[in-house]
Image: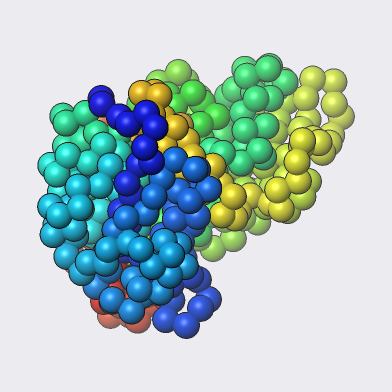
Amino acid sequence: MDTPTTAPYRVAILGTGRPRNTEGWTGWGMAHAHARGYNASGQCRIVALCDIVPEKAELFNGEHADGQAAVYADYEKLLDEVRPDIVSVCTWPALHAPMVIACARAGVKAIHCEKPMAPTWGESRRMAQACAERGVQLTFNHQRRFLESFQTARTLVKDGAIGDLVRLEGACSNLLDWGTHWLNMFSFYNDDIAGEWVMGQVDARAPRFVYGVPMETQAVCQVRYRNGVTGLLLTGEQAGQIVGCANRLIGTEGMIEVHDKEPTVRLRGKGDAELRAVDLMTLEGGIHGDKAVTRTVADVVQSLREGRTPLVAADNALNTTEVIYATYESARRRGRIDLPLTADDHPLQAMLDAGVFPEAVKDAQATDAQGRSNHLA
């Protein structure tokens, strides 16, 4: 892959939006975090922006590009006229696949996309395949791989602090939007070993749409990885109370917990009678925040320059996404799903369309906290 060695990479951002909790915001405003990461890298210049709401793009331009970026409402025109080196896709999931594939076809060198990957498993595979075929570096923003809390937990496992890793547990609000982070952390702790099979169940008595994609009310996801480690993720009502932490790593000789509040990492290792706090080199204010995105973007840029595999490469995002859609498929089939997953659709959407949860379908649209109209917001 030919990359410049001295000149800054020319960056385009598709989907600008407004920062969370500001006037006109419709999401987390992740494009702003991406932009801060590119500017902090010292190796990039933001040269083009795309949003279907020009006012948002112009505000973004002033905040992150000194008003010097070209602003477009049509991303295909942007790709044709600007020919950027790197593109961040910060739109809602329905546009991820078409935008990523268009970028790959336009000769973009690297694409950094927001998660979840796409509204269906088929789209997720196709966007990754399009980039692989053209030698394009594709990454997804599973940014928590760059936070010290999670890296410390992984290092403790690799150092044998809890013996051999046996089981991973987690709890969050839903599978596809939030669960993609925790299942990706399961993969991170377990050397990105692919799944062997998935058994799952979902309930959608009060479904909601997040960024235009249906999410369950509750779910149970059990995954068996090819090295024998198992994972258990609970979502929805009382999931956090049941698990008792964000992530738990259980080994043959101990246990590690990652918590939302400090001390974020707690260990019961060999010879420990109970959990004890693990000192981190720096206090990062918990397991959230833009610092993780800044570090992720820096790795994306440096990986492109050095020709190495990024920590948030598409392969581990595919492993994560396959487990999610296999959980939905397991609920649809009422049985274990052996991987690789062959169903291309979104099984939960299909079940909602088929009236599997009839008492909930009529209210599903009303529970979308973000709305469904502006996919570029």
Tell me residue 295's x, y (percent). Answer: 54, 42
Observer-nearest of 8 and 303: 8
Q: Which colour scheme is used?
A: rainbow
Q: Give the side of residue 300 with respect to residue 374, left or right.
A: right
Q: Identify the residue at horizontal 23%, vertical 58% (top origin).
A: 95
Residue 123 position, x and y percent, is 19, 47
Instruction: Report the side of 198 relative to 285 (left or right).
Output: left
| Residue for point 65% across, 56% down | 241
One can see residue 55 in this view: yes
Quadrant (top left/top right/bottom left/bottom right) for the N terminus: top left
Where the C terminus falls, by quadrant?
bottom left
**Percent x, y for residue 167?**
57, 30
Say which quarter of the image contains residue 200.
top left
Give above or below for 137 relative to 334: above
Residue 362: x %, y % from top left: 28, 80
Q: Residue at x 59, y 55 (%)?
A: 289
- Residues 46 and 367: in front is 46
Left or right: 104 in relation to 114: left
Q: Is residue 349 above or below residue 315?
A: below
Residue 150 location, quadrant: top right
Q: Quadrant of residue 91?
A: bottom left
Q: Which of 82 and 30 is in front in this view?
A: 82
Count of numbered badges drawn on the protein: 0
In the foreground, 229 or 37: 37
In this rendering, position of residue 252 left or right of residue 136: right
Residue at the (48%, 51%) spot, across then down: 39
Q: Report whether residue 324 is seen.
A: no
